[in-house]
Amino acid sequence: MPNNLPVYVGNETIARLIEFCKEKSYSKFLLVCDQNTYSVLGKAVESALLAQGYDVVTACLTGKEVIADEHYLIQVLIKADREGRIFLAIGSGTLTDISRFISFKTRTSFISLPTAASVDGFTSIGAPLVVGGMKKTYISQAPVALFADLPTLCRAPGLLTAAGYGDLMGKFLSAADWRLGHILWDEKYDAEIDRRMRAAVMKAAHLATEIRQGLETGIQPLMTGLIESGFCMLDFGNSNPASGAEHHISHFWEMLLLNQHRPAIFHGVKVGVASIFTSAWYARVRQISQAEVAVLLKDASFGPADEQVRAIRAAFGPVADEIIEDQKPFLSMTEQALEALKQRIVARWAEVQDIAAQTPEPATLIQWLQAAGSPVTGQELGFSEEEVLMGINYGHYLRKRFTINKLRLLLGFSAK
Ligand SMILES: [Zn+2]
């Protein structure tokens, strides 16, 4: 883990936290939690800090579902005084993102104390917030340290942990998409970070059963894998190493739920299901020879630009203009550029197949996710077949990247 942010995952979390605070001469804190995370860890942290004679203010957010929106951001802002308190984010992704954003805006720092191995974003600099009903990531700051209490992680709700496992297994596909974009679309790439990412994922892949049982032998590698994935993004400078077509599909579904005011679904649970689809496209790539790919690409295209623009407008409404602008490299591609891309795909087909060879079979992924207690179909997530297909067919418009979903369109693979 080259990133030098102090990280601890173990059984002596509070003692280590206090040691760190003493070392840094931190003495004033704003503890951010919700009712659940207060009872599982926050209360113990609060008592320990008070016992040291520290000045502690607690913002305990209430409500059925805490989301990083105006309502909850303001609640934390109201508790933030001008004392330069160090924020302690006690919880999963949402509470961390609220703390990340408000501590950044009030010119102080925050320490992450995750209560579930649920996402890889704890050490991220971006805070995904819902503002005016739209989700957008605001660049803010990484924590100054991360202390994860292993017994608390082991007791976390099963679906939260399964979501962390789904997010991590999705990295097999993100890493593949990253390298695919590099060889076919000249995207920036770093082989060492790719290697670190794969190593982190491999360590947890075969531990689905232990993870489901909440055993330390499973949860520890899962959490360290998620943290390492976060570091890979920090060290690379963007999310490309850990987010590919599977994340774009998941983002589309997330937007759909938000727009329709439907309950949110944990990030990694959606990523896990989307990864099964993208792994199936890599499986097909493995079966096609270079001669066959040349035939498949002969008359291939992404489709008429005007039709695509109409479809984007229908699917994305108010954010369509931004997406159309972002997708220009694909929408305004000249005949010659398309031809050059196709020739490149054929010429580098052996490398494409090598990338595909490093992704798990869809059946393997299904087996792993099921063993971890995670859903494996769109229906299990509560999506209709049409909504599942919309995620697949529109998700790739959400980022200016060349992923397996773009390659699938050129090769004429069906969505499922
Ligand atoms: Zn993710």
Image (tube, grey):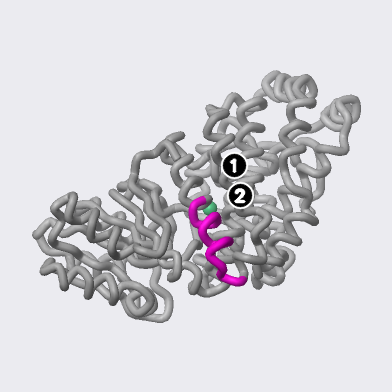
Q: Is residue 395 visible?
A: no
The CB of the residue at mark 2 lies under 8 Å from ligand 1:
no
From the viewer's perspective, tell me whether residue 225 is left or right of residue 181.
Answer: left
Residue at image point 70% right, 66% down: 371
**Percent position (x, y) of residue 256?**
56, 63
Q: Amino acid at mark 1?
A: Ala
Disc 1 marks which residue?
199
Badge 1 marks a residue whose secondary structure is helix
Coordinates of residue 146 in the picture (x, y in percent): 35, 54
Alpha-carbon distance for marks 2 and 1? 6 Å
Residue 270, compared with residue 236, is above or below; it is below
Residue 222 among those drawn in magenta: yes
Q: Nearer the viewer, residue 375 or 360?
A: 360
Q: Is residue 186 above or below residue 62?
A: above
Q: Is residue 216 magenta?
A: yes
How many marks the image carries: the answer is 2
The residue to which callout 2 is attached is 203
Counting from the top left corner in percent of width and height, residue 218 is at 58, 61
The quadrant of the image that shows the N terminus is top left
Residue situated in front as seen by the camera: 346 or 49 = 49
- Of residue 345 and residue 199, the one placed in the foreground of this image is 199
Q: Position of residue 238 (x, y in %)?
A: 45, 38
Quadrant of the frame with the C terminus: bottom right
| Tag 2 secondary structure | helix
Contact between labelled residues 1 and 2, with CB atoms less than 8 Å apart: yes
Tell me the residue at 53%/64% (across/down).
216
- Kindly report the secondary structure that dominates the magenta region of the rendered protein: helix
Magenta span covers which residues? 213-224
10 Å crowding of disc 1: few (<14), some (14-19), many (20+):
some
Q: Identify whether 159 is placed above or below 224.
A: below
Left or right relative to 29: residue 203: right
Query: Is residue 25 in view from this perspective?
Result: yes
